[in-house]
Amino acid sequence: MMIPIPIPIPIPNPIISLAQLQQIHGHLLSSGLFHFYPSRSKFLDSCAASALPYAAAIFSRIPLPLTNDWNAIIRGHAQSHHPINALVTFLAMLRRASCRPDALTCSFFLKACARALAVTEAFQMHARVLKSGFQADVLLQTTLLDAQAKCGELDNALKLFYEMSRKDIASWNALISGLAQGNRPFEALELFKEMGHGCGMMPNDVTVLGALSACSQLGAVREGDGVYEYIRNNGLDENVIVCNAVIDMYAKCGLVDKACSVFEGMKCRRSVITWNTMIMGFAMDGDGVRALQIFNCMDGGRLGGPMPDDVTYLAALCACNHAGMVEEGLRVFRLMDKHGVRKNVKHYGSVVDLLGRAGRLDEAYEIIVCMPVFPDVVLWQTLLGASKTHGNVGMAENASRNLVEMGSSTCGDFVLLSNVYAAQKRWNDVGKVRGAMMSRDVKKIPGFSYMEVNGAIFKFFNGDKGHPNWRQIYWKLEEISIQIREFGYAPQTNFVLHDIGDEEKANALCYHSEKLAVAFGLISTDEGTSINIYKNLRICGDCHVVIKLISKLYGRKIIVRDRTRFHRFEEGSCSCKDYW
Ligand code: ZN
Ligand code: ZN
């Protein structure tokens, strides 16, 4: 579980109260100033920012509203919780021939598109901007780019960016954070570097947030160090949101001690997100003890720090879960009731996982059926997984039945159930599960791994032959597979789904993306260097065994961050103690 960096929603503070607005309104009416267009639209503008319904009511009584009146209302809607209303108001404006939209109208419309993720409307506005000749307006260009980037139209945003006559910092930021959030972290980092080299642009706090997010997605420590150095040299570390992102980046890159030293040395006041990020950092690292130490330091907000929120408790539960600390986890779970923090389905999921892993399946089941919120698919999947680990066929069938009733048909569920039957040698049932899978056309999510070598980042898919050195990588894997067999390794072919022979299964396993990445790490880095890998899915059991052996055979420290946690392989064992 990752803690996302919150994006501030531009909701204006209601600085002026409704009573004050009504007073000003009364004054404008009695003095006749309300009919003076500039003062009316100015009033409407501040009114829409703090009391939108009141502004809309006044607006509806203006017989022939002019452009700035419309702009005030469209802007108010664009910043409200229902940005889509800005688009509706704009259409109403077009239907009334009393005035025409100007560059500001277009800009507010685009801001609404960005928040409502209205792609088509953003494109339509782009065409209108070109037709009306507003494209020379740099601010409008930036808003256009921002809307496209936020709507996920990154290629268009890039095209706009390179066409722009002047660039300003806002357009760089829009693009860097758009790329980072749109799963294109490589390009985000490239652009960040380009910005620092001779463009005369100084990255600001928004820019570094985008760059840090890209670094943590890629596990790119070296780049992350560079960004952090820039942050310190330019005083950006006085911004708590930036500090939180640095802690998060180091934790996600596997350097939890570095994250902790940033946490301890912060110049600004820590927010609840700071604490949550640090607890989650230790949780992902499997260090339940230190995670709980930090959690206990908060002391329910009694020491003057922030009150733990639902995310804090979730992070603490995750920590207990990853470290197998069952009793401590149950204590944290009970503390939530004591401190009046509402539990959601994720808290229940974490406790079910905790009990399930410990083999306390009946208690886990009890929690699922008694919880006040409706259990989701993940809860039953967790119970199914635990039933498989502990060979409890009855409970596995129970969980599967619930999953099928909920319409879930992911590959993992079927594989788990078929593995439960296979372990009991109930081949008939295995056949039935496989049949059900085929009839439902169950698809697997493709697995991939990233790794960084000398500042460059490489991506591998399962069975990938796209790398220029793929032959050497495959030869290395062959060498590894011969060597580890001497250590008594036998491929765990039950991690392969396809209905193929054992030898083919072993081959399919051999070229899993994380194995390709490790082999590439071995051939391309100096002896003794540690190898860092990021995997998008959970690491499979076979890769886990193989990487443990590689760490011993080649004397390397190998760190794999998978979807849920870190695995640190050293001297033939893993930091998770095979508990994942
Ligand atoms: Zn694998
Ligand atoms: Zn592990």
Image (cartoon, grey):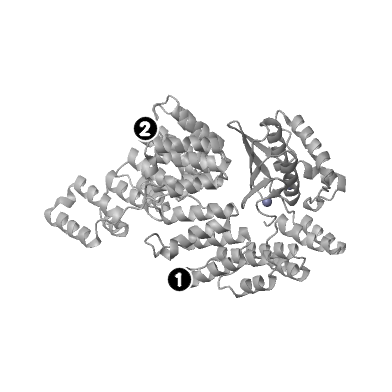
- Quote the CA–CA distance across marks 2 and 1: 50 Å
Quarter in which the N terminus is drawn: bottom right
Q: Position of residue 291 (x, y in %)?
A: 53, 57
Picture quadrant of residue 203: top left
Residue 279 is left or right of residue 551, and the answer is left
Quarter in which the C terminus is drawn: bottom right
The foreground one among 173 and 389 is 389
Residue 358 is left or right of residue 222, and the answer is right
Local secondary structure at mark 1: loop
User: Which residue is rendered at x = 50% and y = 33% of the image?
Assistant: 158
Q: Position of residue 393 (x, y in %)?
A: 78, 68
User: Which residue is rendered at x = 57% and y = 66% of the image?
Assistant: 328
Q: Position of residue 324 (x, y in %)?
A: 63, 61
The type of residue carrying mark 1 is: Gly
In the displayed structure, would residue 436 be above or below residue 244? below
In the displayed structure, would residue 211 be above or below residue 162? below
Of callouts 2 and 1, which one flags the residue occurring earlier in the amino acid sequence? 2
The type of residue carrying mark 2 is: Val
The mark found on residue 138 in the picture is 2
Q: Is mark 1 within 8 Å of ligand 2?
A: no
**Crowd band around label 1 with a 10 angstrom C-alpha radius: few (<14), some (14–19), many (20+):** few
The foreground one among 348 and 376 is 348
Picture quadrant of residue 319: bottom right
Q: Would you say residue 535 is visible in this rendering?
A: no
The mark found on residue 3 in the picture is none
Q: Nearer the viewer, mark 2 or mark 1?
A: 1
Residue named by callout 1: 340
Q: Would you say residue 9 is visible in this rendering?
A: yes
